[in-house]
Amino acid sequence: MSLLADYGFVLLVLACAFGFFMAWGVGANDVANAMGTSVGSRALTVKQAILIAMIFEFAGAYLAGGAVTQTIKGGIVDPAVIPPELMVLGMMSALLAAGSWLLIASTRGWPVSTTHTIVGAVVGFAAVGISTDAVNWSGLAPIVGSWVVSPVLSGIVAFALFMSVQKLIIDTEDPFRSAKRYVPLYMFATGFMVTIMTVSKGLKQVGVSLSPLHSTLLAGAIGLAVMALGMVLLSRIKLDPEADKTFHYASVEKVFAVLMVFTACSMAFAHGSNDVANAVGPLAAVVEVIQTGAAVGAKAPLPGWVLLLGAIGIVVGLATYGYKVIATIGREITELTPSRGFAAELATATTVVGASAIGLPVSTTHTLVGAVLGIGIARGIGALNLGMVGKIFMSWLITLPAGAILAIIFFTIFRAIFL
């Protein structure tokens, strides 16, 4: 315990720096993936997407990021097996390893999973640096399972949404009128879904607890408010016969472009709520051990400033480097229009916020790619850029061992320095 007594403050400062570095990587790499559909469909410019993401990523991270943070903090490794001083050094190693890998990936424009990176890093230091018994293998199973289930589920939801658009709007006698009639309902669904998931689970982390009835009423009210705002914006969009001569559904896509502003907000909120944990989960474990000098308690209260640090780091990463990888998902898997991009974003946001509510760290990148693939399949397999899909899958396979190997290296260095 002398390590924590002698170097507690130094370790805490280093952990905060590494946590911020990791959060920067999440913002630079993962947020770009999350907003790629909005940019790729040309519903938003890069600057507009970054502005929306900065606001709603921060809100999602701070308001609804606590449940997943608890899982990353104490659900992957068994705190009872790992001595407190090794837990501190290990979690610091995981943060530095994950941040380093994300920096490498972002500079090269690779869309990698930050969730895979941090989980691989935590498992790597625990299994190799300490003992295989230190890993909570039973707790790891649902996390790994979610990496398969979440993109499949998101793809199915996106496929269903896209087919509903085809039936209700595209394949009608007057698609423009149908779009103005039905798009507000999609807006209501977007507002309602994000709100109900957040208030029913996430807000407990900031001391707000509502009954199921009150949660539903609040979500309904916010859904109606979103729909009303959307209808005001839609009233300004007029049929454009000239544009329709070039592309038959040009006017319809303008309607969906308004909808994509709302789904982009929900996507940013969903991403912040889940992926902030990748940065602040290990940091929360370090803070708890240094403050108490004991093993991590799975249900110990999460300091608000830890979530705040992660939220700020994500925003800084997005603003400074997010532009490097923001186009990969939006432009290089399948051609996206606002009507297709909205389905991908709403499906992803629904899946990710739902996972955040139950504390499951899913890969936003996987989930979004699954949704975009669902859109591509709905249009026919020939609409997919299978070469790019293969490259993305390959980057996913590399990420897990890369995070683990780097964490083992840093853990060995830290042990040599401090022990």
Image (tube, rainbow, N blue to C red):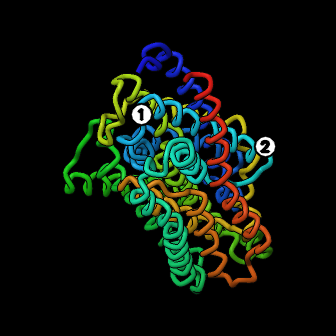
Residue shown at the point (70%, 70%) measured from the top left: 250
Instruction: Decide which of 293, 258 is in the foreground and name it.
Output: 293
Which disc, if any, is residue 107? 2
Left or right relative to 324: residue 295: left
Instruction: For mark 2, give the secondary structure.
Output: helix
In x, y percent, where is residue 404? 62, 48
Q: Position of residue 351 (x, y in %)?
A: 46, 63
**Residue at the disc numbered 1:** 83
Q: Is residue 405 left or right of residue 289?
A: right
Residue farthest along the top direction in this orientation: 6
Q: In the picture shown, does residue 272 fall above or below 242? A: above
Q: Position of residue 242 (x, y in %)?
A: 77, 70
Which image quadrant: the C terminus? Answer: top right
Residue shown at 46% from the left, 40% from the top = 281
| Front-lying residue, 260 or 6 | 6
Mark 1, residues whose alpha carbon is within 10 Å: few (<14), some, or many (≥20)? some
Q: Label 2 neighbourhood size at 10 Å, few (<14), some (14-19), many (20+)?
A: few
* Relative to 384, residue 237 above or below: above
Tell me which amino acid carries mark 1: Pro
Mark 2 or 1 closer to N-term? 1
Marks 2/1: CA distance?
A: 36 Å
Q: Amino acid at mark 2?
A: Thr
Residue 56 in view here = no
Whether residue 363 is visible to the viewer of this picture, yes or no, is yes
